[in-house]
Image: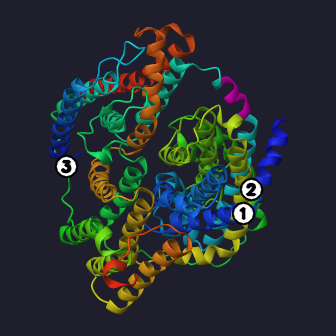
């Protein structure tokens, strides 16, 4: 049990609950033919979530000593992978599926473990081109392509 | 038409060439997914759910739904089986349902009997699949006939029971499980309300009008969450993999495991039917039961073949049993079946009592394909055990980025928006941190998929009663469901308090 995480999570969820409670005030309180409106359900959920969050915060005070053994987390690797995934998703539509997927995979493989660059490039190229051709060309699932500025793929 | 005719009709659907192909692909991919490090049944089904949508795009809606579900069901029980391979060869269970298998499975592998252990779990899984199939055929119709009489109040109460049952059983802290459930329900309200048509929590952002896509969140939480966990925590595993020599079990092995397999498949099936109980509990129950009734219980834990046969059979039987509440009541009892329910809804098919009337081809086709799929699983696995075992060596280096790329592709191919891709990544990060800190994810996914229906039934019941909440207690069945749901929460708390008091008393003495 991680006391700090749970306490922050409790506060965060309390905020989420407050958000749903406050925002549900702006929804209609009745609908045609019924005395109950579409605000009831989110309001109720918000209140219950709030109560549970308070309960969690209360529980953290009773936790036994914080016995989280510190593990070494590979933040650098995670950061590179997540960062490149975000860029990949942002540029997917504009730059095209095949190119962004290829770049993301090469960076991802190398971030996981350095070395074997040729193998990384080969696997990335075959995955990105393979998926693009099978789905876009054969199965007619349109994937963003960069034909507008590259003329291919 | 009676059940038999429907079943025959189902076989006609299952034997269409594309469905045989889908069943084959499903069990093959499923087994591979189960064996691959870091992905279990739930991740596998979530990861491949969007792809099924693209694969079946050319078929008519009804056929597309049948094919997609046949594929997903194949992945589900294929992965259940595949999970046993790593337990036996590596002593690392792929998912919680095969933890019990490691106890005797790894010992057998150490004694050079890995092949026999793998083979007996393939046979056990096959028998379990067949028993579950018969259970499904026998129970599905009567249950849906009862459920068809349910009004909105009964449905609401039953869904509450289903949700609380799952939340009460997973994870270490019930508070956290319930919070996850509420979060799932809350996220499900975003978008245009189906009953009144008013926009909720959308802030005039167009992409939010259709709500947060279940598929995106499920793939993010389960598939990406696992990837982020691996990139942050693990470096490649260097554990030695046991060698496989002889694959066929001996006659003595078969004799020893015949009864455990028979008992565990029935036990596992019935545990699987209960909402929330599922494969993990089924496998540990059956292991404990076999140890209890065994003539020489000291063998267990030292490589007894019964200790592999029983839990492996039970968890597959439970996987089959878990389909019953999904198909007949429209209430999934586990994370994986919740994702399968997402697939039904994606094809505009509402699981529940009317499913058997409105879409007999889909549901009986699915049931019949389970027979075909299980047969394929057996035929495929006996000769291919060694090939699948090689997959364990797949370098994590390549697997993790590929899973991300595959999730991105899958979500984009169905949703076509950058917003969903961002939501996918956010869900992945949240999935990692939440599950790492014992916030269980299945209640969230289950609540997300059930939320809209839960609300719909609540609103209809309240409209009937003119806003009087007592309607849930005036209908006897609804009241019973709610009381059981209440007890489900209260009893564990009561027991915990009591055991705390006993502990205190012991300390004071």
How crowded pointer 3 is (Cα within 10 Å; few <14, some 14-19, many 20+) is rated as few
The answer to whether one can see residue A150 in this image is yes
First to last magenta residue range? B140-146
Does residue B74 show up magenta in the picture?
no
Chain assignment, label 3: A
Q: Would you say the residues marked 2 and 3 are in contact, meaning their CB atoms lie under 8 Å apart?
A: no
* Residue A55 in the image, given as x and y percentages of width and height: 22, 28
Residue B361 left/right relative to A115: right
Q: Which one is in front, B256 or B377? A: B377
Q: Which one is in front, B380 or A153? A: A153
Number of the front mark, 2 or 3: 2
Task: Indicate the quadrant containing the N terminus of chain B: top left, top right, bottom left or bottom right.
Answer: top right
Task: Report, in whole angstroms, how far the alpha carbon at label 3 lies from the one at label 1.
Answer: 52 Å
Q: Which residue is mark 1?
A: B20
How crowded pointer 2 is (Cα within 10 Å; few <14, some 14-19, many 20+) is rated as many
* Residue A100 in the image, given as x and y percentages of width and height: 32, 76
Q: In the image, which disc is placed on residue A67?
A: 3
Q: Would you say the residues marked 1 and 2 are in contact, meaning their CB atoms lie under 8 Å apart?
A: yes
């Amino acid at each position: 049990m991680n006391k700090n995480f749970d306490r922050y999570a409790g506060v965060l969820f309390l905020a989420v609950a407050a958000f749903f409670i406050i925002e549900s005030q702006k929804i209609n309180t009745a609908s045609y033919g019924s005395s109950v409106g579409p605000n009831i359900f989110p309001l109720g959920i918000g209140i219950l979530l709030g109560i549970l969050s308070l309960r969690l915060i209360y529980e953290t005070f009773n936790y036994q000593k914080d016995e989280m053994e510190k593990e070494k987390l590979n933040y650098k690797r995670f950061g590179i992978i997540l960062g490149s995934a975000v860029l990949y998703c942002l540029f997917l539509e504009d730059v095209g599926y095949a190119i962004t997927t290829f770049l993301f995979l090469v960076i991802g493989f190398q971030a996981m473990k350095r070395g074997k660059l040729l193998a990384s490039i080969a696997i990335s190229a075959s995955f990105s081109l393979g998926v693009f051709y099978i789905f876009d060309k054969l199965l007619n699932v349109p994937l963003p392509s960069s034909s507008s500025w590259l003329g291919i793929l | 038409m009676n059940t038999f005719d429907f079943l025959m009709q189902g076989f006609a659907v299952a034997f269409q060439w594309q469905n045989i192909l889908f069943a084959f692909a499903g069990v093959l991919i499923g087994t591979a997914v189960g064996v691959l490090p870091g992905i279990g049944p739930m991740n596998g089904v979530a990861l491949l759910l969007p792809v099924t949508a693209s694969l079946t795009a050319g078929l008519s809606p009804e056929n597309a739904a049948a094919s997609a579900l046949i594929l997903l069901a194949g992945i589900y029980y294929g992965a259940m089986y595949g999970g046993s391979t790593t337990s036996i060869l590596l002593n690392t269970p792929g998912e919680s349902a095969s933890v019990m298998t490691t106890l005797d499975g790894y010992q057998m592998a150490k004694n050079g009997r890995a092949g026999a252990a793998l083979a007996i779990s393939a046979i056990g899984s096959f028998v379990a699949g067949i028993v579950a199939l018969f259970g499904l055929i026998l129970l599905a119709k009567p249950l849906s006939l009862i459920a068809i009489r349910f009004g909105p109040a009964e449905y609401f109460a039953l869904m509450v029971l289903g949700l609380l049952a799952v939340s009460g059983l997973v994870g270490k802290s019930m508070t956290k499980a319930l919070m996850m459930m509420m979060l799932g329900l809350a996220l499900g309200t975003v978008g245009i309300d189906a009953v009144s048509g008013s926009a909720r929590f959308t802030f005039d952002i167009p992409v939010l009008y259709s709500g947060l896509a279940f598929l995106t969140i499920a793939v993010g939480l389960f598939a990406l969450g696992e990837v982020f966990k691996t990139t942050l925590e693990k470096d490649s595993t260097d554990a030695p993999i046991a060698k496989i020599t002889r694959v066929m079990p001996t006659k003595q092995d078969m004799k020893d495991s015949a009864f455990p397999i028979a008992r565990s498949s029935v036990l596992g099936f019935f545990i699987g039917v209960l909402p929330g109980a599922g494969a993990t509990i089924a496998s540990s129950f059956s292991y404990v039961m076999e140890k209890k009734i065994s003539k020489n219980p000291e063998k267990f834990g030292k490589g007894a073949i019964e200790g592999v046969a029983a839990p492996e059979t039970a968890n597959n039987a439970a996987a089959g049993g878990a389909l019953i509440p999904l198909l007949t009541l429209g209430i999934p009892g586990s994370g994986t079946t919740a994702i399968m329910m997402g697939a039904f809804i994606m094809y505009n098919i509402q699981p529940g009592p009317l499913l058997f009337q409105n879409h007999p081809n889909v549901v009986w086709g699915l049931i019949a394909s389970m027979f075909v799929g299980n047969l394929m699983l057996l035929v495929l696995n006996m000769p291919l055990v060694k090939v699948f075992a090689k997959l364990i060596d797949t370098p994590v280096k390549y697997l993790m980025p590929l899973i991300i790329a595959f999730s991105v592709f899958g979500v984009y191919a169905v949703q076509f928006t950058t917003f969903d891709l961002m939501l996918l990544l956010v869900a992945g990060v949240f999935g990692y941190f939440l599950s790492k800190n014992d916030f269980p994810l299945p209640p969230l996914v289950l609540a997300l998929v059930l939320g809209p229906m839960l609300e719909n039934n609540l609103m209809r019941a309240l409209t009937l009663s003119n806003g009087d909440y007592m309607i849930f207690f005036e209908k006897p069945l609804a009241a019973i469901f709610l009381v059981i749901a209440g007890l489900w929460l209260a009893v564990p708390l009561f027991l915990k308090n009591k055991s705390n008091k006993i502990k205190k008393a012991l300390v004071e003495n």
